Amino acid sequence: MFAPYIEYARKAFAREATYRIELIAEIGSLVLRVYLLRSLWTALYAHNAAPTGLPLHSMVTYTTVALLMSLVLEVDGTRVIREKLREGGIAVDLMKPIVVPFAYFSDGIGQTLLHAAAIVPSLLFALLLVRIDVPSLPVLAIFFCSFALGYGVNFFVNFLMNGVAFWTLETFGLQLIVRWISDLLSGQILPLSFFPGWFGRAVFALPFAAIYSTPLLVYVGIIPPAKWAAALAVQATWLAVTAGASYLLWRAASRRVVVQGG
Amino acid sequence: MPLIVTRDLRKVFRSAKRFPGALGALRGLFSPVYEDRVAVTGLSMEIERGEFIGYIGPNGAGKSTTIKMLTGILVPSGGEVEVAGIVPHRKRRENARNIGVVFGQRTQLYWDLPLVDSFELLRAIYGIPQDRYRRSLDAFVELLEMGDFLRTPVRQLSLGQRMRGDFAAAMLHEPPILYLDEPTIGLDVVAKEAIRTFVSRVNREQGTTIVLTTHDLADVERLCRRIVLIDHGRAIFDGPIERIKNEYGRERTLVVRFTETTSAPAIPGARLESLEGLTARFVFDRATQRVDRLVREVSDRYSVEDIAIEEPELEGIIRHIYTQGYAGEERSA
């Protein structure tokens, strides 16, 4: 019953592994960004008082871990939907006895696993340049739970973006905008607690915060153990909402599948 | 009970009308006007188990739309469709187990991975037991001569090799029904012949029901006993190839090669079509003129080196129908 989907993941893993140079370049650029951001924050902290109780070493830890997470979170596992819609390959998949979104989900998992493997060398290289804090075991455990939930939210946000292609075929512009918004509001670039006033409160109410911000704030200790349950519950809610929306989108889409080149 | 049945099948596509220019695009965005395009209408046909059908028609006639409804990925706008007792669009996955599909213009193989990897994925998808998988893969490797490139990444294969891979991929689960959509497009003569031999063998030996969509009428002539001709979304002919040839191909050509230069040769009952050098071509109606009389007349009148009679080719007939319309009795079902 799951055999086809496990195989989809394995093939995606093998496929991504054939792009060796791309992966090496990705690791290289990541290590470079770790170094640049450390320099940036060090310079900024030297001229200003530390904001919101986040000392420099926590800030460097935050950005480094965020970059490592991005290795996995920037994998757009469902971009196949968009590509297959444009090229008509989705027709071939629909002619198979499979649940097509599950197949694409598995493909995404396969891609993610390969990029997750790249975290280890990236981390080792990064540690040559920066020192990051290592929290206690319970914090790490919660961080990974929260990361997994964030992965799910990210996956379905991407799914929804790519699913728009069912109606428009072209989603590049939309994706670019959502990517910019998401980079800023997810806490990937800087902690959301930096945003002032009502805006600072509003960003926490968006699904993007569930992607990077929650796991990272758990990691650096801004979310204390007492608030873990609540933070993860918010993530789980977003996961349910985006997954539900994805389901509805797929149902509507499969009713109007008009394959290109008909 | 036929294997594939369609009754009054219909598909209408609704699309937003486009207006020219930037302002037009804006207008289309805010007050869209919809246009209906009838892709298939009133299509009724029955296909028996083991048949090999040529499903032909000009571009945009509705062939692909029909195939998509038969595979369950398009929902019909009206009428009924049943494939092996299943309504495809209601039970797409169940239907998928009964069918194999080959598209000449796209591949289902993993581009970056060795060919055999795609087969392994299909084994998992269809839940083919390991020993049966081994057996049928070995058979395909031998039949389609894939041994040399089984472990080559698909992107490095020639089109002919890739097509052979696609055929094996479509048939690994031994489906009783095979849909072929222009499977020989772009292939050289040798590769074409290999594919034709293969599908004809599959049809004969395994009794696989095959629906072939193609523009290569040599494929159809060589492989199919029956053709369904579709134009403007309607089936305008459904029957044996011989019948369409008889109805349309009443004209024969008598090719005469004279021993000496002959000006304006003529035979009663035949029309001189062309005269090039020593060779003259006469067209006559097979139903009203007897061949033996024409041959006797021409050899009585002239000094003749060689005589041949040409039958019309399916291609010529189909071209005639595409451009002139079908004048025969319209098939009503």
Image (cartoon, coloured by chain):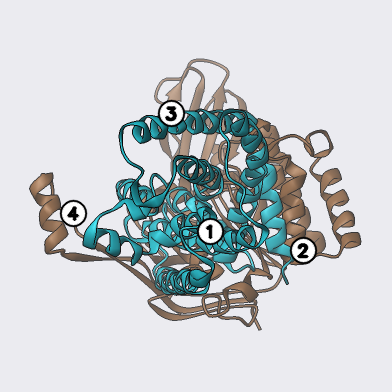
Chain colours: A cyan, B brown
Whether labels 1 and 4 share one chain: no
| Pointer 2 with pointer 4, Cβ within 8 A | no
Q: Chain of mark 2?
A: B
Provide residue B86's location: percent of width, then percent of height: 60, 81
Whether labels 1 and 3 share one chain: yes
Number of the front mark, 3 or 2: 3
Category of crowding for the residue at label 1, using alpha-carbon neighbours closer than 10 angstroms: few (below 14), some (14–19), many (at least 20): many
Residue B174: numbered disc: 2
Q: How much space separates mark 3 and mark 4, taking CA atoms? A: 53 Å
Q: Chain of mark 1?
A: A
| Pointer 1 with pointer 2, Cβ within 8 A | no
Residue B18: numbered disc: 4
Q: Residue at x 58, y 54 (%)?
A: A108
| Pointer 1 with pointer 4, Cβ within 8 A | no
Q: Is residue B294 left or right of residue A46?
A: right
Residue type at mark 2 is Glu
Residue A39: numbered disc: 3
Number of the front mark, 3 or 4: 3
Residue type at mark 1 is Tyr
Q: Nearer the viewer, residue B16 or A72?
A: A72
Category of crowding for the residue at label 2, using alpha-carbon neighbours closer than 10 angstroms: few (below 14), some (14–19), many (at least 20): some
Q: Is residue B138 left or right of residue B70?
A: right
Residue type at mark 3 is Ser
